[in-house]
Amino acid sequence: MSETHAQTVTFVRDTMLPPVAPPVGERGAVKWLRENLFSTPLNIALTVLGVVAIWWLVSSSLPWWLNSVWNASSLGECRQIVAANAGEGATGACWAMIRERWHQFLFGFYPPSQWWRPILAFGLLFGALAPVLFAGQKRSLTVLLGAVLVFLLITLYLAGAPGVPFALAIALVLGMLALAQMQPGRLLWFTLIYPALCFWLLWGGSVWSPIVAMAGFGVLYAVFRLASPMIGLAPAAGVGIVVAVLWWLYAEGPVVSVVQGVLPFALQSINSDQFGGFLLAIVIGVTGIAFSLPIGILLALGRQSDMLIVKTLSVGFIEFIRGVPLITLLFTASLLLQYFLPPGTNFDIILRVIILVTFFAAAYLAEVIRGGLAALPRGQYEAADALGLDYWRAQRLIILPQALKVSIPAIVSTFIGLFKDTTLVAFVGLMDPLKGVTQIVRADINWKGIYWEPYIFVGVIFFVICFGMSRYSMYLERKLKTDHR
Amino acid sequence: MAMATDVPKDGFRLSMLIYDTRYRSYTIQLVVLVLFALAVAWLLNNTVQNLAARGKEFNYAFLWQRAGYDIGQQLIPYTNDSTHFRALLVGLINTLVVAFLGCIFATILGVVVGVLRLSNNWLVSRLMTIYVETFRNVPLLLWILLSYVILSEVTPLPRDFRVTDEMEAAGEAPNASMILFDTVAVTNRGTNIPSPLFERGLGTLDLGFMTLNLTFWAVVAVIAGSVFVNRRILASARAAQAATGLRPVTWWKSILVLFAPVIALLVAMGFHLEIPELKGFNFAGGILVAHSFTALLIALTLYTAAFIAEIVRAGIQAISRGQSEAAFALGLRPNRTMSLIILPQALRVIIPPLISQYLNLTKNTSLGIAVSYLDLRGTLGGITLNQTGRELECMLLMMLIYLTISLSISTVMNLYNKSVQLKAR
C-alpha cells in the first residue's frame, strides 16, 4: 500500500466531528454519586447506613440546638421557656448556664477586677510565640501580632483594665509590630523575658521578684563570659550555674526586699487556689510544653549515648515515667513530695504539678525524639565527625535539626496529649475546666441535672486548641520539607 | 608511603581527664554517678527524717489488717472484713478486666474505623474522619464523665419498667422496657444482665489460701483442650497438603471439636441463664453491672479506637500500591489479597504503635477514679491510703504494680511483634 498517498484517496476527513457529551451516567453529579457512593453493593449498604446515622443524629439533636435558651436563671426556667416556645415535651439546650458561669470555666475564682491580667498574659503569649512559630516570616508575624493587638484592645476594654497597664500593653504590642517590620530576629528577646512577665501578671506580688530571678540568668551569663577565657567552656558553665544557684538561694530574697522597699511597685497577689478553668489548663499546658522539649531532647541524647551510666539512668527514668499512669505521678506531687523534700519545705501545688507533668511529657518526648535520631542514616553522624565538629556542635548543627524535623508530628501529638492531660489535675484538688468547674456548676441547685451543655462547651474549646495544634504541625511539616518526593 | 605512627605516649596528666576524649567520658560518667548518688542519698535522708518527724515507720504490715470498706464490683470473694491486701487484689482484677475488655473492643472498633476511613465511599470516610478527630482532640476525662452522666441520668428508673394492672387493662406499654429479647435492663442504678447458673455445678475446691470455682475452671479447661486439638487437626491438614498437594476438608471437624465438648459439658452441668426480673422497686436476679464500669469501658473504647484507627490507616497506607497490584496480577481475589499480601505487611507497621496504645489504655483505666470505679487506684491508692495514712507505702506499691503490668504487656506484645517482623537473614 506504499503507493497510496493522501492525495490519491477519494475521501480524507479534514474536520473532526464535535465531541459528544459523555452519557448521563458518566458525568457530573451522577458520575460522582455512582463512583463515590454507589459503586458496589457493599458501598451502597455503607452509604445507606451512613445516611441513616446522620439522619438519626440530626433529627434527635437539631430541635435541641434550635430551641436553645440564652436567658434564664435556672435549668427549670430554661425548661419552662422551651416548653412555652416549642410546646410540651420539646427539648432545648440551656446555654443560659454558660452565659451565667462562663467566667468560672475560663478563670476559676480569679477575682473579676483582675481578669485583665490573665487576658493580657494570654494575648502576650502569642506575641512571645510569634517569633518561634513563624521565624523570619514578616507577613505571618505581622498578621499574628495584629490579631493580638485587636484581641487585646477588645478584651482588655471589656474586662475593664485600668488605664496605665492598658496603655502599656498596647504600646508594647505596637512596638513589637514595628520591630517585626524592621528586625524580626530581635523579637526573640521578648520571648525570653515573657516567662517572668507572665508569672508576675498571673500571680502578682512585687514586680522585683521576677526581675531579680531573671537577673540570676544574667549573673550566670556574666560569670560564664568572664571565666571561660581562663578555665575553659565546660568548667566556666559549671561555675556559672553554681553562682546562679547561690544567687537564687541566698541573694534573691534580700535584694527583692531592699529594692521593693525603695521602689514599691506591686500587683495584688493572687493565690494558687483561685486559679481554675482554662486559665489553669493553659498555664500548666504551656509551661509543661515549654520545659518538656529541652528535657526530652537531653533524655533522648542520654539514651543514645555511649556512656553506660548516663544511658542507664536515662533509660531508667524514661521507662519508669512511661510505665506508671500520670495520676499516680500527680498524687506523688500532692502527697509524696512532702516526704522527699527537706522537712518544712512547702511550695505551690501548681508548681509541683507543673514539674511532674513536665517530667511525664519529657519521657514521652524522649522516646519520640529517639525515634527521629534512630531514623537518621549513620552517614550523617560520620559526616559530622569527619568535619571535625565536637559532640554538641554536631548535635546542634547536623543531627538534631534533621531528627526533630522527622519527629514533628509525634512531638506535637505528645504536646496535644499533655494539654489534654492537664484535666487530670482535678484529682489533686485543682479546679480544671472539666471535672473541677463542671462539678461546681452541676452541684449548684439552679443548674442541677444539666450535663450536655457544660461538657459541649468545654469539649469544643479543647477541640479548637488541640485541632489548631495539629494543623500547625502539618503546616510546619510542609514548610520544613526539603526532600523531593 | 606514609607511615602510621603510634600516638606518642606522654605521661598521664590530670587535665587529660577533661580535654582528652579518651578519658573525658569516664570523668563525665563519674560526675553523673556521684551527683545521682548524692541526690538519692539526699532524698532518702529527707524521707527518713520526715517519717521520723511524723512518727511513722516504713512497713507493709497494714496490708494484713481488716479493710472495712465495701467494693461494688468484685470478681473474687470479698467482704469488708477482708484484708487490705484482698482489697488490693480486687482492685487489681478490676483494673485488668477493664483494660482487657477495653483493648479488645478498641481494637475491633479501631480496625473497622481505620479501614472504613480509607474506603472509596465518600460519605462513610468523612463520617469516620469526624469521629476520629472529635475523639482524639478532646480529653478522655470528658468522655468518661459524659458517658457516666448520661448513663446514670438519662436511663429510666427501675419502677418505669413496672406494668401495673390498670396499664395492662388499658393496653398501655410501660415507660421503659428491657432490651435484647427482654434479658437486659438498663436502669439508672446499673445494667442488669443475665447470669449463668448451673443446676449440677462441680462446686468449689478450697485450697486454704484461695478457693477455686471448679465449674468455671472445667469450662476453661475444656475450651483450652478443644483449641489444642483443633490446632493439631489443622497442623495435620497442613502436613497432608504439603505431602500430597491436596488439603483434606477440615471445617466440620474444627466446628465439632471446638463447640461440641463445651456444649456437652454445659448441658451436663445443667447450664441456664438467670434473667433479671423486676421485684418490688428494683431488679433481682442476674448480675448488676455498675455504670461506673460501663461508662469507663465505653469511654476508653471510643477514645482509644480513634487512635488505633489512625494507626491502622497509616499501616495500610504504608504498603505500596504495587503490592496489591502485583497480587491482582497473580489473580488473587480482593479478600485473599487483603489477608495474604496487605495485612501481613501492614501488621509490621501497625503493631509497635498498637502496643503503646494498649499501654496507654491500661494506664488510663486509673481515670476510673472520676466515676468512683474501684480499681487499683481506687482501692490501694484511694480508700486504703486514706484509711491507713500510709501514703509512701501505698504509692510505691501502686507504682510498682502499674510498672509491672506495663512492662509485662510490652514484653508480651514485643514477642508477638518479633514473630511477625521480617525475618532477615
Image: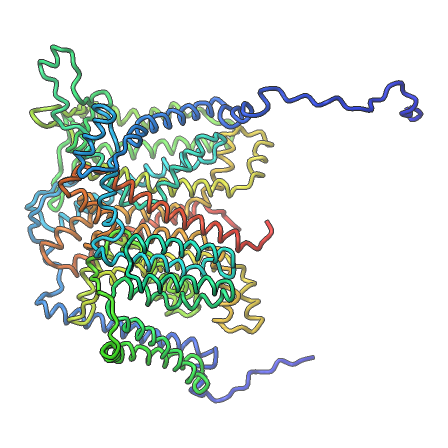
- For the point 48% across and 81% down, the residue is B20
Which quadrant is home to the N terminus of chain A?
Answer: top right
Viewer-side residue, B160 vs A164: A164
Residue A120 position by quadrant: bottom left
Residue A203 position by quadrant: bottom left
Viewer-side residue, B360 vs A465: A465
Residue A230 appears left or right of B149: right
Extreme-front residue of the structure: A163
Residue A178 appears left or right of A110: right
Q: Position of residue B40 (x, y in %)?
A: 25, 71
Residue B280 appears left or right of A310: left
Coloring basis for residues: rainbow
Q: Is residue B399 shown to the viewer in this render?
A: no
Q: Position of residue A285 (x, y in %)?
A: 32, 56
> Number of labelled discs?
0
Residue A107 appears left or right of B318: left
Q: Is residue B293 above or below residue B385?
A: above
Q: Is residue B254 above or below residue B19?
A: above
Q: Is residue A55 above or below residue A360?
A: above
Q: Position of residue A133 (x, y in %)?
A: 45, 58
Q: Is residue B300 shown to the viewer in this render?
A: yes
Residue B142 position by quadrant: top left
Q: Position of residue B321 (x, y in %)?
A: 56, 38
- For the point 35% across and 60% down, the residue is A362
- For the point 8% across and 14% down, the residue is B165
